[in-house]
Amino acid sequence: MSSTTVIVAAIVAAIVAVLSSLLSWLIARQKNVRMQTELETMLSSEQDRVAERDQRIRQGEDDRARLLERVEVERENRSEAEQAVRELRTRLDVQQQHHEQTLKELEENRETQKQAFHHIANEILEAKGKLFSQQHQERLDTLLTPFKEQLVDFRNKVEQAQKADIEGRAALKQQLETLHSLNQRITDEAGNLARALKGDKKLQGNWGELQVEKILESSGLIKGEEYEREANFKDDDGQNKRPDFVVYLPEGKHLIIDSKVSLVDYMSYVNAEDDEERQAALSRHIVSIRNHIKGLGDKDYPNLSGVKTPDFVFMFMPVEPAFIAAFQHDQKLFNDAFEQNIVVVTPTTLLATLRTVANLWTIERQNANARKLAERAGLVYDKLRVFVEKMEKLDTQLTTARNTYDEAMNTLKQGRGNLISQTNEFVALGVRVKKEFSRQTLDTSDLSQLPEKE
């Protein structure tokens, strides 16, 4: 029994030792699991912080890229505007040279005609001055006065054209110098008013139209003559249609401008606190612009009765950053608008376009003045030609009258059997008369040539 007890005790001791070891292992394993969990938690937290930091870095890089793109777009727009200004200056210089050459030729023709007129008039007056009585001189003055007035008027027209051209070039230079500052001021005003007008679509629309009218005035166009606000037209159904602005072009054509302001979604885009909100606001902003384009295209302004427009309408967006944000994000937007005969413009592009229109009107007026001067020169030339022809005819008639007069006087006083000698013979033969010929008449008559008596 004692050996069995010892064996049992040994087994129990072994079992206790095994259980003790197992318990120690389980406790150690549990501690390891807790430590591993804590390490994983710490690792996950650290990874989240790293991911958040990377996200901020990427967002900063995206913002930097967007700013660089915006700067590049602004640089390209400025470059295009400067190129347009250079091309416009080149065209104006060419037109100026052409008009100066035309005016020079007209002035030379006027001077040549004036000299020819004075030369012919002096020759005629010198040759025939002794033959004209005071009555003839008054008639000649009556004939010459209209020519003098036309020459004076012609000279005044030339001087006015030269003065208008010089003033136009000076005004154009001043306008070009203020183009950049004016555009910057409009952009700044647009940003400030965009915040002030947020949410009020009626005020936004009125403000957009006001910006268009300011640009029209700055371009040099004349209200009521070269552009009109809310002109009335009829569609095919006889309904009234009133575009915001109609710009008149030379040759009776029109340019239609309609202002559309989209600010609510754009302001949400600018003030968004995260990318998701910003992207959603930008998408709504683009949809709003597309709706404006579709609504303007549905009005079909180019096909209205009495409208002669180049098959497209200008949709004006007064806030250039709103335009840039939408059209950079959706590059198909411009082409989609153009397919509906809509061209989207901003203060910069609209002002450059309207400056070109204003200069076209200046050139048109200069061409009209040149045509009028040429017509007046032609009229003066024709009048002078008719006058010369009449004076030549008068010279012929005077020569004929002089010859007839000389022949009559010869018959009266000179030659064999002239009338004076024969009638004077009656007196010598005793015919009684009330009064005899004067001594001067007898002295200038040939009294010796009497016909032979039979």
Image: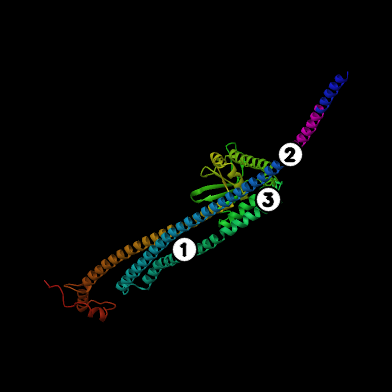
- Is residue 38 shown in magenta? yes
N-term mark: 1 or 3: 1
Marks 1/3: CA distance?
A: 45 Å
Please tell me whether mark 1 sits on a helix, a strand or a loop. Answer: helix
**Residue farthest to the right, as pictured:** 1
Left or right: 200 in relation to 224 = right
The image's mark for residue 39 is: 2
Colour mode? rainbow
Is there CB contact under 8 Å for labels 1 and 3? no
Label at residue 194 = 3
Residue 244 seen: no
Of the pair 247 and 109, the residue shown nearer to us: 247
Whole-number angstrom distance, CA of label 1 to CA of label 2 = 91 Å
Q: Nearer the viewer, mark 3 or mark 2?
A: 2
Image: magenta residue range: 18-44
**Amino acid type at mark 2:** Leu
- Label 2 Cα neighbours within 10 Å, binned few <14 / some 14-19 / many ≥20: few
Which amino acid type is marked by label 3? Ala
User: Where is mark 1, residue-wise?
Assistant: 161
Q: Is residue 254 magenta?
A: no
Question: Would you call the spot at circle 3 few (<14 residues within 10 Å), some (14-19), or many (20 or more)?
Answer: many
* Coordinates of residue 13 in the picture (x, y in percent): 84, 26
- Tell me residue 353's x, y (percent): 53, 52
In depth, the one of 22 and 13 nearer the eye is 13
Report the Cα–Cα distance between label 3 and label 2. 53 Å
- Looking at the rendered structure, the kind of residue marked 1 is Ala
Say which element carries label 3: helix
Viewer-nearest of discs 1 and 2: 2
